[in-house]
C-alpha cells in the first residue's frame, strides 16, 4: 500500500520506538476497511515493537486505536484512513505512543499533564486539508500525554452521513464532550490556552514583567520573521508579539514562487521561519494580539503596545507587520452561515461538498484557481465576479472555461446568502447593468475576494490609506519616528511572501539605523 520510498522512511522512524505499541482495528467489508487493514498490517510488519489486532468493537467502521505499553487503555483513535496530509500525523502518533519524545518544551508537557478535568475530543478532518494536521497532532499529543483526555480523529469523507448529521461544513471541526468546541485551525498553544483557563493570566503577568526592547516586532508572518532575524543579527534586544506565528502563510496551500524553494506549503514555510527566528536570541511571544499603539511622547522615547490580555510591551522602536486577512462579502447571511456553507479555504473544505453545487466569489487568480480545484470534486461551480471580466491570468481563465461543470457570471454583485437556519441553500446576486436580482440554489459558497489589512487598531496613531494600509516610504518608515512597518499591512504594491520578507529586512535595517543615530543616553532601552 505504501510505496518503497515511504516504506523505507517509515521503517527508519519506527526504529525510534522505545516501547511496544498496540494497534486495534474495527473493520467491515467495505473498501475503506480493506485499505485500513492493509495499512496497519504493513506498519506492524516494519517493527517488532508494533502489534496489530482486528477485533475492535468501535461504532465507527473503519477505525483503529493506538495504545502504548505504559498506557494500555487507548486514548487515541483514528476513524477512516489517515493518509494524505494526515499520514505524518499517524507517524507522529506511533512515535509518541512508543516513547519517542515530541518536539515541545518540558513546560508545555507539564501544562498538558496538569490540565484539570476530563476531556473527550472528536475532530473531523479532510485528507486535502492543510490546516487540519496541526489540530490532529495537538489533540493526539494531549491525549497520549494526559490519561484524562481522549481524542478521536475522524476523516470526514469516510463518514459523510455523520458529517452531515452534525452539521460539519468546514474542517478542521473539533467537538468536546459532544458539543462544537472549535472550528478552524488551532495550534497546540491555542488549544491549551482554551483548556487551561489560567494560562492567559499567567502569560499576561509574565509579559508585564518584561524589560523594554530595542526593537519590538508586532506580527509573526514572513515580514515579521525576516525583521526579527535581521535585528537579532545586529545584536540588539528583539521581541516578537504575534497573534499567530506564521500569519496568513499558515492558510496557504502550494507555494511555488519563493525563490530557491521549488515547492513548499504554508505550514512548512511557517515552521521554517519560526525555527530560523528561534536560532537567534529573540523573545517570541505567541498568541498575543495587539490592541493599541501608544507612540513615544518624545524623540527616542519608548513606544508602548497594549495587548488584548491587558499587558503592555515597551520598545525604543517598533516594526508593524500585522499582515492581512481574507476580505469578507459583508452581506446578510454571510456571518450567520460561516462554516455552515460559507467557507474561505477551498483546499480544506472542498471535499465536504463532494457532489454538491457551490459558488466561488471572485474572479482573480485565487478565485479562478479555487473554481478549477473545486470543479474536480463538486457537481457544479458558479463563479461570480463583480467586474465585467475575470482578472485572473489568461492561462487560468482558459483552463476554467474548458471545464464542463463551471458557469461564469460577470458584472454581478452578491447581495445575500440564503439558508434554512442550519446550512446554506443559495445566494442572491444583482446583475449590475440591469440591477435585476437572481437566485442561485447551492450548498456552498467559497469567498475569494482579496485581503483586508489588520490595522484597525492603529487608527489615529500612524497614517493609514483609505483602504487601511499603513503608509510607508522606501525605508519602511511610517508617519511616526521610530515606528516602521512591512508586509501586507502596508502600501507595498504587491502582496507576495518574498516581497514581505524583503520588506521585513528593510524595516529591520531602518530600525537599526534609527537606533544607532539616537543620542548615546537614549540607545539603551530604559526600564519600564
Image: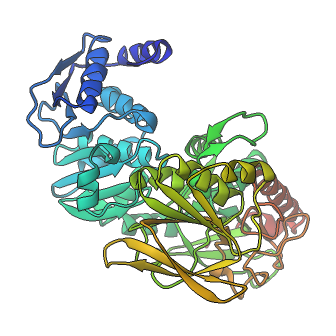
Above or below residue 38? Residue 257 is: below
Q: Quadrant of residue 74?
A: top left
Residue at the location (54% across, 69% down)?
Answer: 289
Residue at the location (63% across, 43% down)?
Answer: 254
Residue at the location (25% across, 10% down)?
Answer: 48
Quarter the C terminus occupies: bottom right
- Could you say which is closer to the camera, residue 441 or residue 459? 441
Above or below residue 283? Residue 153 is: above
Q: Position of residue 495 (x, y in %)?
A: 76, 60
One can see residue 307 in this view:
yes
Q: Looking at this view, name the residue that lies furthest to the front.
A: 404
Q: Position of residue 20 (x, y in %)?
A: 21, 19
Q: Position of residue 440 (x, y in %)?
A: 50, 74
Q: Position of residue 210 (x, y in %)?
A: 55, 64
Q: Quadrant of residue 338?
A: bottom left
One can see residue 231 in this view:
no
| 324 sits to left or right of 358 | right
The number of numbered badges drawn on the structure is 0
| 349 sits to left or right of 362 | left
Residue at the location (16% across, 31% down)?
Answer: 28
Amino acid at each position: 500500500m505504501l510505496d518503497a520510498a515511504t516504506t523505507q522512511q517509515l521503517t527508519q522512524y519506527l526504529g525510534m520506538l522505545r516501547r511496544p505499541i498496540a494497534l486495534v482495528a474495527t473493520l467491515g467489508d467495505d473498501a475503506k476497511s480493506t485499505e485500513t487493514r492493509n495499512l496497519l498490517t504493513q506498519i506492524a510488519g516494519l517493527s517488532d515493537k508494533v502489534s496489530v489486532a482486528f477485533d475492535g468493537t468501535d461504532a465507527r467502521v473503519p477505525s483503529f486505536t493506538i495504545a502504548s505499553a505504559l498506557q494500555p487503555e487507548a486514548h487515541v483513535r483514528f476513524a477512516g484512513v489517515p493518509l494524505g496530509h494526515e499520514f505524518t500525523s499517524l507517524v507522529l502518533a506511533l512515535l509518541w505512543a512508543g516513547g519517542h519524545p515530541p518536539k515541545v518544551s518540558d513546560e508545555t508537557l507539564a501544562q498538558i499533564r496538569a490540565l484539570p478535568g476530563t476531556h473527550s475530543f472528536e475532530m473531523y478532518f479532510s485528507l486535502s486539508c492543510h490546516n487540519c494536521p496541526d489540530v490532529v497532532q495537538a489533540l493526539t499529543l494531549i491525549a497520549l500525554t494526559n490519561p484524562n483526555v481522549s481524542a478521536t480523529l475522524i476523516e470526514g469523507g469516510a463518514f459523510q452521513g455523520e458529517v452531515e448529521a452534525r452539521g460539519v461544513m468546514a474542517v478542521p471541526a473539533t467537538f468536546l464532550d459532544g458539543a462544537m468546541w472549535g472550528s478552524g485551525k488551532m495550534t497546540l498553544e491555542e488549544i491549551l490556552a482554551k483548556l487551561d483557563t489560567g494560562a492567559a493570566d499567567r502569560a499576561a503577568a509574565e509579559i508585564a514583567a518584561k524589560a523594554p526592547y530595542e526593537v519590538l516586532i508586532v506580527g509573526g508572518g514572513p515580514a515579521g520573521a525576516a525583521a526579527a532575524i535581521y535585528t537579532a543579527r545586529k545584536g540588539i534586544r528583539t521581541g516578537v508579539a504575534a497573534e499567530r506565528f506564521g500569519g496568513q502563510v499558515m492558510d496557504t496551500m502550494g507555494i511555488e514562487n519563493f525563490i530557491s524553494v521549488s515547492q513548499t506549503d504554508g505550514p512548512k514555510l511557517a515552521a521554517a521561519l519560526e525555527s530560523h527566528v528561534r536560532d537567534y536570541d529573540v523573545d517570541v511571544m505567541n498568541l498575543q494580539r495587539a490592541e493599541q499603539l501608544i507612540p513615544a511622547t518624545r524623540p527616542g522615547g519608548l513606544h508602548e503596545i497594549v495587548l488584548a490580555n491587558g499587558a503592555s510591551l515597551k520598545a525604543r522602536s517598533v516594526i508593524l507587520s500585522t499582515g492581512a486577512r481574507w476580505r469578507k462579502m459583508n452581506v446578510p447571511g454571510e456571518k450567520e452561515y460561516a462554516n455552515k456553507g460559507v467557507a474561505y479555504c477551498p483546499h480544506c473544505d472542498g471535499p465536504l461538498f463532494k457532489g454538491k453545487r457551490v459558488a466561488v466569489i471572485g474572479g482573480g487568480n485565487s478565485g479562478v484557481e479555487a473554481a478549477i480545484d473545486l470543479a474536480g470534486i463538486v457537481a457544479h461551480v458558479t463563479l461570480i465576479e463583480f467586474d465585467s471580466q475575470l482578472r485572473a491570468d489568461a492561462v487560468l481563465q482558459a483552463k476554467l472555461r474548458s471545464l464542463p461543470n463551471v458557469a461564469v457570471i460577470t458584472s454581478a454583485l452578491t447581495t445575500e446568502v440564503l439558508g434554512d437556519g442550519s446550512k446554506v441553500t443559495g445566494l442572491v446576486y444583482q446583475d449590475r447593468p440591469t440591477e435585476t436580482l437572481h437566485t442561485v440554489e447551492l450548498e456552498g459558497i467559497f469567498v475569494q475576494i482579496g485581503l483586508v489589512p489588520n490595522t484597525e487598531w492603529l487608527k489615529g496613531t500612524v497614517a493609514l490609506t483609505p483602504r487601511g494600509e499603513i503608509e510607508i516610504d522606501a525605508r519602511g518608515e511610517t508617519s511616526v519616528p521610530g515606528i516602521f512597518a512591512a508586509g501586507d499591512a502596508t502600501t507595498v504594491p504587491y502582496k507576495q511572501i518574498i516581497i514581505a520578507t524583503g520588506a521585513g529586512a528593510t524595516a529591520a535595517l531602518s530600525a537599526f539605523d534609527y537606533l544607532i543615530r539616537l543620542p548615546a543616553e537614549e540607545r539603551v532601552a530604559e526600564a519600564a
